[in-house]
Amino acid sequence: MRKLCPGIRGLLTVAGILVLASSAVAEQAAASLPATSPATAPAGRQILVSLAGAPVGDGSAERPLDIATAFSASGPAKPGDTILLAGAVYEGPMKDIERLPFVLAVSGLPDKPIALQPVPGAWVHLNGTLQITGSHMRIANLEIGDLKWDRTGKTHKNGPAGPTWPSSTGMARTR
């Protein structure tokens, strides 16, 4: 279990959906799930994302993708693929003073999740919030949070935040 940022105590996947929970809840739930590791996951292709990436990129080192394209449901990631983020601070989209969430809409399969992680040895921060609308993914070693947070909301504020789940899962929507 990895700590993503202060205040998030545990991380696990339930029915292919990333769940943030307290340590005790996460440990109890993780103990009841079958063991998997990146070594046992099917190997797909690697898709590189960088600040210099473009929507017309192919995810290679020579032509990396931008983060919005890589995270979209219509992007190139397929079940079993790994989305690798080059080390950087990725700024979330803005609408006036409101920071909109990054929307992670990719979907893998139960036996072929899509992995989202930094390039080995890199540090990645998603500056904003992350809304998860896809399923069957593994997310590791990312920092997520707004570095320009304004508690008064006068100069900067966040839009809808946190993971949301499709209503078919029976889980309550969170904000």
Image (cartoon, grey):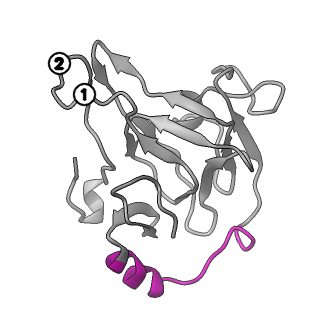
Q: Quadrant of residue 85?
A: top right
Residue at label 1?
Answer: 150
Structural distance between the alpha carbons of marks 1 and 2: 7 Å
> Does 59 sit above or below residue 104?
above
Which residue, as the protein is rendered here, is positioned at the far bottom?
32
Boundaries of the magenta span: 24-41
Is 29 in front, or is 9?
Answer: 9
Q: Residue at x 31, y 46 (%)?
A: 162
Amino acid carrying mark 1 in the image: Asp
Q: Are marks 1 and 2 in contact (CB under 8 Å)?
A: yes
Residue 127 position in % (x across, y down): 45, 33
Label 2, secondary structure: give it: loop
Dot 1 alpha-carbon crowd within 10 angstroms: few under 14, some 14 to 19, many 20 or more: few
Residue hosting label 2: 154
Disc 2 residue type? Lys
Residue at x 68%, y 57% (from the top left corner)? 80
Q: Is residue 110 above or below residue 88?
A: below
Q: Is residue 88 magenta?
A: no
x, y (%) of residue 53? Answer: 68, 23
Of residues 19 and 151, the one drawn nearer to the viewer in this rendering: 151
Please tell me whether mark 1 sits on a helix, a strand or a loop.
loop
Instruction: Identify whether 167 is placed above or below 143.
Output: below
Q: Position of residue 44 (x, y in %)?
A: 75, 55
Q: Quadrant of residue 58?
A: top right
